[in-house]
Image: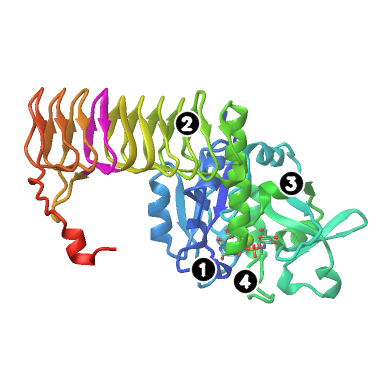
């Protein structure tokens, strides 16, 4: 059930510390942009979501609209009102309470966000982290057990820098308080920005209730640099893999496995060390051996690898794929391809064996062409299949053949040139030893 709450997600910042031309919130973890995760969790709680953009706003909006509809995108008046406070100005909010999230927090979870919604009489419920080292965060200044204010790192004096209670950057505001007090923010600080965090001091001076809520650092980790990005992804990967293992999937050395968040794994599946599973991949009752890569493909009752590569739009059923076999945009049902092959733009039917070194020659430099192989076909080692080509059921190709004509049921094709044997040539060339 959705709550009666508005949510603002801040995503207008440039992300200078990322040192990248890509907007910070579009950097990916586990295959999806950081902002995707904030919106996804927000959608579980609210039907009034506002995403604030500025830097490369069109690009960020376009990327997010691939996943979400019903989101309000607003552009911050960044020239006149930079900063996290400027970002929330001039919003048309639907509900009495407003939750503010940062777009650079890809690990947030709905269950923890719900804790911010239970308090009805606070002007602000704010998130607090108790850390060993609060470097990079705004510090929460507490006197006599009460919050006094938040001071940004760049504005901290020596004593404040030593404070290890940090602002996690998530707040639930009374919407009326927000509307009335945003105009009171000033930019008189080290960054000449309008800080949302200054609303805490304003509320306290006005005798309004500010409630600190201690949160788990792992879920509220702010990503500001590529180092933060890597450590957030590590946590996210562990979550993905632990969920699969809890559901019965076997993983060998899970720390060496990489799985995108969109991947599905079902049934009695085994994922060995070094495996990478990407995009819209679905693995059902299958065994993925060491160092194989699968992207945007479905595998059912199959085994692949070690070192196999299944590229997008492939469907493998009851199929065995061995080492150094690459499959692309192909449907293989009941097929064996044990070694060293490229099978692209092909359909291969049950009982068919693909010999080592077989290549579908699917590209003529301009266009891609289809290879169709029927049931119980025996493809000899090192066969080149020049597409478009169709091999009917129960056909054979001789090892080393280059095939450019279709085969009818029952036929064998051999395209070897006649062997020419020259007696004693070795001895003439190298001499007798
Ligand atoms: C902010 C908090 C800090 C807190 C930290 C937690 C402020 C002033 N500081 O600092 O107290 O410890 O988060 O991670 O709020 N953004 C805009 N418009 C802007 C500037 C930023 O939308 O003009 C967005 C960014 O895209 C980002 C979020 O606000 O998603 C936070 O901005 P960031 O620059 O990362 O703030 P921090 O320095 O991390
Ligand atoms: Mg930040």
Q: Return the disc, 4 or 3, that comes first in the chain's sequence.
A: 4
Q: Dot 3 corresponds to which residue? A: 216
The x, y position of residue 116, in whole percent, is: 70, 42
Counting every numbered tag in the picture gives 4
The x, y position of residue 69, in whole percent, is: 41, 42
Disc sitting over residue 56 in the figure = none
- Relative vertical location of residue 409 with respect to residue 63 in this rendering, above or below: above
- Relative vertical location of residue 60 with respect to residue 263 in this rendering, above or below: below
The x, y position of residue 383, in whole percent, is: 19, 41
Q: Return the disc, 2 or 1, that comes first in the chain's sequence.
A: 1
* Mark 3 C-beta closer than 8 Å to ligand 1: no
Which marked residue is nearer to the observer: mark 4 or mark 3?
3
Task: Tell me the quarter of the picture where residue 149 sits.
Answer: bottom right
Which marked residue is nearer to the observer: mark 2 or mark 4?
2
Q: CA distance from mark 2 to mark 1?
A: 52 Å
SS at circle 4: loop
Which quadrant of the frame does ligand 2 lie within?
A: bottom right
* Mark 1 C-beta closer than 8 Å to ligand 1: yes
Q: CA distance from mark 2 to mark 4?
A: 54 Å
Q: Dot 2 corresponds to which residue? A: 287
Q: Which residues are magenta?
A: 341-359
Disc 1: CA contacts within 10 A as few (<14), some (14-19) or many (>=20): some
- Quadrant that contains the N terminus: top right
Q: CA distance from mark 3 to mark 1?
A: 31 Å
Q: In the picture provided, is 306 more to the left or to the right than 235?
A: left
Which marked residue is nearer to the observer: mark 3 or mark 2?
2
SS at circle 3: loop
Do tag 2 and tag 4 residues touch (Cβ < 8 Å)? Answer: no
* Of residues 295 and 76, the one drawn nearer to the viewer in this rendering: 295
Q: CA distance from mark 3 to mark 2?
A: 36 Å
Q: In the picture provided, is 225 more to the left or to the right than 177?
A: left
Q: Return the disc, 3 or 2, that comes first in the chain's sequence.
A: 3
């Amino acid at each position: 059930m959705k709550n009666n709450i508005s949510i603002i997600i801040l995503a207008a910042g440039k992300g200078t510390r990322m040192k990248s031309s890509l907007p910070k919130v579009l950097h990916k973890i586990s295959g999806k942009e950081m902002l995707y995760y904030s919106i996804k969790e927000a959608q579980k709680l609210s039907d009034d979501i506002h995403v604030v953009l500025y830097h490369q706003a069109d690009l960020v909006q376009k990327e997010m609209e691939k996943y979400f509809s019903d989101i309000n995108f607003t552009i911050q008046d960044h020239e006149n009102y930079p900063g996290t406070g400027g970002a929330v100005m001039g919003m048309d909010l639907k509900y009495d309470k407003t939750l503010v999230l940062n777009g650079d927090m890809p690990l947030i979870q709905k269950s923890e966000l719900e804790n911010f919604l239970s308090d009805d009489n606070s002007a602000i419920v704010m998130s607090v982290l108790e850390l060993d080292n609060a470097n990079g965060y705004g510090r929460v200044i507490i006197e006599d057990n009460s919050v006094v204010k938040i001071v940004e790192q760049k504005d901290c004096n020596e004593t404040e820098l030593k404070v290890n209670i940090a602002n996690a950057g998530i707040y639930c505001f009374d919407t009326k308080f927000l509307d009335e007090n945003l105009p009171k923010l000033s930019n008189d600080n080290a960054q000449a920005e309008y800080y949302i965090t200054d609303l805490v001091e304003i509320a306290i001076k006005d005798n309004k209730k500010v409630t600190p809520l201690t949160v788990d650092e792992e879920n509220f980790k702010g990503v500001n640099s590529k180092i933060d990005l890597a450590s957030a992804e590590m946590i996210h990967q562990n979550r993905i893999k632990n969920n699969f293992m809890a559901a019965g999937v076997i993983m060998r050395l899970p720390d060496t496995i990489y799985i995108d968040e969109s991947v599905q794994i079902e049934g009695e599946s085994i994922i060995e060390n070094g495996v990478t599973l990407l995009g819209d991949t679905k693995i059902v009752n299958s065994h993925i051996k060491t160092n194989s890569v699968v992207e945007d493909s479905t595998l059912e009752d199959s085994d692949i690898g070690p070192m196999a590569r299944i590229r997008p739009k492939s469907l493998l059923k009851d199929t065995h794929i061995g080492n150094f076999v690459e499959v692309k945009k192909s449907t293989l049902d009941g097929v064996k391809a044990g070694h060293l092959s490229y099978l692209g733009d092909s359909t291969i039917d049950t009982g068919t064996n693909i010999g080592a070194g077989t290549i579908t020659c699917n590209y003529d430099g301009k266009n891609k062409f289809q290879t169709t192989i029927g049931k119980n076909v025996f493809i000899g080692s090192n066969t080149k299949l020049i597409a478009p080509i169709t091999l009917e059921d129960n056909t054979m190709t001789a090892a080393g053949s280059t095939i450019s004509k279709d085969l009818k049921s029952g036929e064998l094709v051999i395209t070897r040139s006649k062997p020419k044997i020259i007696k004693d040539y070795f001895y003439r060339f190298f001499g007798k030893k």
